Amino acid sequence: MSKISVSDKAQEYFLKIITKQNMKGLAIRLTATNPGTPGAQCGILYCPKEYITPNDEHFQMKGFEIVIDSGVSSFLDDSVIDLGKDDDGGDLLTFHAPNLTKSPLPDDAPLRDKIDLFIKNVVSPSLAGHGGAVELAGVTDDGVVQVRFEGGCLGCSLASVTLQDGIKSQLTQAFPGMIKDVVDVTNHVKTDETYQA
Protein backbone atom coordinates (compact mmCIF):
# COMPACT_ATOMS: atom_id res chain seq x y z
CA MET A 1 0.00 0.00 0.00
CA SER A 2 1.21 3.49 -0.85
CA LYS A 3 2.37 5.95 1.75
CA ILE A 4 1.09 9.47 1.12
CA SER A 5 1.40 12.61 3.20
CA VAL A 6 -1.21 15.37 3.10
CA SER A 7 -0.53 18.48 5.18
CA ASP A 8 -3.20 19.76 7.58
CA LYS A 9 -3.64 22.88 5.41
CA ALA A 10 -4.14 20.75 2.29
CA GLN A 11 -6.66 18.54 4.11
CA GLU A 12 -8.61 21.62 5.23
CA TYR A 13 -8.57 22.90 1.63
CA PHE A 14 -9.83 19.58 0.23
CA LEU A 15 -12.59 19.34 2.85
CA LYS A 16 -13.70 22.89 2.04
CA ILE A 17 -14.02 22.25 -1.71
CA ILE A 18 -15.65 18.83 -1.19
CA THR A 19 -18.24 20.35 1.17
CA LYS A 20 -19.11 22.97 -1.48
CA GLN A 21 -19.91 20.18 -3.98
CA ASN A 22 -22.67 18.87 -1.69
CA MET A 23 -22.26 15.26 -2.91
CA LYS A 24 -22.44 12.51 -0.30
CA GLY A 25 -19.39 10.21 -0.35
CA LEU A 26 -17.37 12.44 -2.69
CA ALA A 27 -13.68 11.55 -2.45
CA ILE A 28 -10.45 12.90 -3.87
CA ARG A 29 -8.71 10.68 -6.45
CA LEU A 30 -4.96 10.84 -7.03
CA THR A 31 -4.06 9.82 -10.58
CA ALA A 32 -0.94 8.87 -12.51
CA THR A 33 -0.80 9.06 -16.30
CA ASN A 34 2.03 7.28 -18.16
CA PRO A 35 3.69 6.26 -14.87
CA GLY A 36 7.23 4.92 -15.06
CA THR A 37 7.99 6.94 -18.21
CA PRO A 38 9.62 10.33 -18.89
CA GLY A 39 6.18 11.74 -19.78
CA ALA A 40 4.52 10.75 -16.51
CA GLN A 41 2.03 13.14 -14.92
CA CYS A 42 0.10 13.09 -11.66
CA GLY A 43 -3.24 14.68 -10.94
CA ILE A 44 -5.96 15.33 -8.39
CA LEU A 45 -9.65 14.84 -9.26
CA TYR A 46 -13.03 14.71 -7.58
CA CYS A 47 -14.25 11.11 -7.31
CA PRO A 48 -17.99 10.47 -6.79
CA LYS A 49 -18.61 7.36 -4.68
CA GLU A 50 -20.00 5.40 -7.65
CA TYR A 51 -16.57 5.64 -9.32
CA ILE A 52 -14.71 4.16 -6.37
CA THR A 53 -13.81 0.57 -7.27
CA PRO A 54 -12.66 -2.52 -5.34
CA ASN A 55 -9.27 -1.97 -7.01
CA ASP A 56 -8.79 1.34 -5.15
CA GLU A 57 -6.62 1.94 -2.12
CA HIS A 58 -8.26 4.15 0.52
CA PHE A 59 -6.69 6.82 2.71
CA GLN A 60 -8.85 8.33 5.45
CA MET A 61 -8.29 12.06 5.95
CA LYS A 62 -10.02 14.58 8.22
CA GLY A 63 -13.62 14.39 7.02
CA PHE A 64 -13.00 12.88 3.59
CA GLU A 65 -11.21 10.06 1.79
CA ILE A 66 -8.45 9.89 -0.82
CA VAL A 67 -8.47 6.97 -3.27
CA ILE A 68 -5.76 5.68 -5.63
CA ASP A 69 -6.07 2.90 -8.20
CA SER A 70 -3.83 0.10 -6.92
CA GLY A 71 -2.44 -0.32 -10.45
CA VAL A 72 -0.59 2.99 -10.13
CA SER A 73 -0.24 3.25 -6.36
CA SER A 74 3.43 2.23 -6.29
CA PHE A 75 4.23 5.23 -8.50
CA LEU A 76 2.50 7.53 -6.00
CA ASP A 77 4.28 6.04 -2.99
CA ASP A 78 5.85 8.72 -0.74
CA SER A 79 3.79 11.47 -2.39
CA VAL A 80 3.43 14.76 -0.52
CA ILE A 81 0.49 17.12 -0.98
CA ASP A 82 0.71 20.59 0.55
CA LEU A 83 -0.99 23.97 0.32
CA GLY A 84 1.01 27.13 -0.08
CA LYS A 85 0.61 30.50 -1.77
CA ASP A 86 1.31 31.54 -5.35
CA ASP A 87 3.00 34.82 -6.35
CA ASP A 88 -0.32 36.66 -6.12
CA GLY A 89 -1.13 35.33 -2.65
CA GLY A 90 -3.71 32.79 -3.87
CA ASP A 91 -3.92 29.19 -2.68
CA LEU A 92 -1.48 26.86 -4.45
CA LEU A 93 -1.90 23.11 -4.05
CA THR A 94 1.32 21.15 -4.70
CA PHE A 95 1.56 17.43 -5.43
CA HIS A 96 5.08 16.02 -5.26
CA ALA A 97 5.34 12.38 -6.41
CA PRO A 98 9.03 11.36 -6.30
CA ASN A 99 8.42 7.85 -7.69
CA LEU A 100 6.20 8.87 -10.61
CA THR A 101 8.79 8.30 -13.34
CA LYS A 102 10.43 5.33 -11.63
CA SER A 103 10.49 2.36 -13.97
CA PRO A 104 10.88 -1.30 -13.02
CA LEU A 105 13.59 -1.34 -15.70
CA PRO A 106 17.09 0.03 -15.07
CA ASP A 107 17.69 3.63 -16.18
CA ASP A 108 20.06 2.47 -18.91
CA ALA A 109 17.57 -0.06 -20.36
CA PRO A 110 17.17 0.25 -24.15
CA LEU A 111 14.30 2.45 -25.36
CA ARG A 112 12.81 -0.64 -27.05
CA ASP A 113 12.45 -2.40 -23.68
CA LYS A 114 10.85 0.66 -22.08
CA ILE A 115 8.36 1.03 -24.93
CA ASP A 116 7.60 -2.70 -24.86
CA LEU A 117 6.84 -2.57 -21.12
CA PHE A 118 4.61 0.49 -21.62
CA ILE A 119 2.67 -1.16 -24.44
CA LYS A 120 2.13 -4.34 -22.40
CA ASN A 121 1.11 -2.51 -19.21
CA VAL A 122 -0.80 0.52 -20.53
CA VAL A 123 -1.63 0.45 -24.24
CA SER A 124 -2.65 -3.15 -24.87
CA PRO A 125 -4.93 -3.43 -21.79
CA SER A 126 -6.84 -0.36 -23.02
CA LEU A 127 -7.81 -2.32 -26.17
CA ALA A 128 -8.98 -5.38 -24.27
CA GLY A 129 -12.56 -4.05 -24.05
CA HIS A 130 -12.92 -4.74 -27.77
CA GLY A 131 -11.13 -8.07 -27.55
CA GLY A 132 -8.03 -6.51 -29.08
CA ALA A 133 -4.39 -6.17 -28.24
CA VAL A 134 -1.23 -4.69 -29.69
CA GLU A 135 2.39 -5.76 -29.43
CA LEU A 136 5.67 -4.08 -30.18
CA ALA A 137 7.18 -5.38 -33.42
CA GLY A 138 10.29 -3.19 -33.37
CA VAL A 139 11.87 0.23 -32.97
CA THR A 140 14.08 1.59 -35.74
CA ASP A 141 17.33 3.44 -35.06
CA ASP A 142 15.67 6.73 -35.98
CA GLY A 143 12.80 6.27 -33.50
CA VAL A 144 9.98 4.76 -35.58
CA VAL A 145 7.92 2.42 -33.41
CA GLN A 146 6.42 -0.56 -35.25
CA VAL A 147 3.36 -2.22 -33.74
CA ARG A 148 1.28 -5.25 -34.64
CA PHE A 149 -2.43 -5.55 -33.82
CA GLU A 150 -3.96 -8.81 -32.57
CA GLY A 151 -7.35 -10.27 -31.64
CA GLY A 152 -10.30 -7.95 -32.21
CA CYS A 153 -8.03 -5.25 -33.69
CA LEU A 154 -6.86 -7.57 -36.48
CA GLY A 155 -8.71 -6.49 -39.62
CA CYS A 156 -10.71 -3.80 -37.78
CA SER A 157 -11.68 -0.82 -39.92
CA LEU A 158 -10.83 1.51 -37.02
CA ALA A 159 -7.27 0.23 -36.56
CA SER A 160 -5.74 3.30 -38.24
CA VAL A 161 -7.74 5.63 -35.97
CA THR A 162 -6.71 3.61 -32.92
CA LEU A 163 -3.10 3.85 -34.08
CA GLN A 164 -3.04 7.61 -34.69
CA ASP A 165 -5.41 8.95 -32.03
CA GLY A 166 -4.70 6.37 -29.34
CA ILE A 167 -1.41 4.51 -29.50
CA LYS A 168 0.72 7.20 -31.15
CA SER A 169 -0.67 9.85 -28.80
CA GLN A 170 0.01 7.70 -25.73
CA LEU A 171 3.54 6.83 -26.79
CA THR A 172 4.60 10.36 -27.76
CA GLN A 173 3.29 11.67 -24.42
CA ALA A 174 5.01 8.91 -22.48
CA PHE A 175 8.33 9.27 -24.34
CA PRO A 176 8.54 12.96 -25.33
CA GLY A 177 11.07 13.71 -28.05
CA MET A 178 12.12 10.07 -28.36
CA ILE A 179 9.61 8.79 -30.92
CA LYS A 180 9.59 9.94 -34.53
CA ASP A 181 6.50 8.00 -35.63
CA VAL A 182 4.33 4.96 -34.86
CA VAL A 183 3.46 2.63 -37.74
CA ASP A 184 1.25 -0.44 -38.10
CA VAL A 185 3.04 -3.48 -39.57
CA THR A 186 0.05 -5.81 -39.17
CA ASN A 187 -1.12 -7.98 -42.06
CA HIS A 188 -4.80 -7.09 -41.50
CA VAL A 189 -7.10 -10.00 -42.25
CA LYS A 190 -10.64 -10.16 -40.88
CA THR A 191 -11.29 -13.07 -38.54
CA ASP A 192 -14.15 -14.20 -36.32
CA GLU A 193 -12.52 -12.12 -33.53
CA THR A 194 -12.41 -8.87 -35.55
CA TYR A 195 -14.17 -6.03 -33.75
CA GLN A 196 -17.20 -4.75 -35.66
CA ALA A 197 -17.54 -0.98 -35.20
Image (cartoon, rainbow, N blue to C red):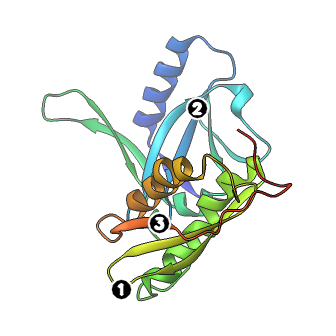
Which quadrant of the figure has residue 77?
Answer: bottom right
Q: Which residue is mark 2?
A: 62
Of the image marks 1 and 2, the number of the one nearer the N terminus: 2
Of the image marks 3 and 2, the number of the one nearer the N terminus: 2
Residue type of the residue flagged with mark 2: Lys
Above or below 161: residue 89: above
Residue in view at x 54 percent, y 44 percent: 30
| SS at badge 3 | strand
Location of residue 137 in the rendering, given as x and y in whole percent from the top left corner: 57, 78
Viewer-nearest of labels 3 and 1?
3
Q: CA distance from mark 3 to mark 2?
A: 49 Å
Viewer-nearest of labels 3 and 2?
3
Residue type of the residue flagged with mark 1: Asp
Location of residue 118 in the rendering, given as x and y in whole percent from the top left corner: 55, 68
Q: Which residue is mark 1?
A: 141
Residue 183's mark? 3
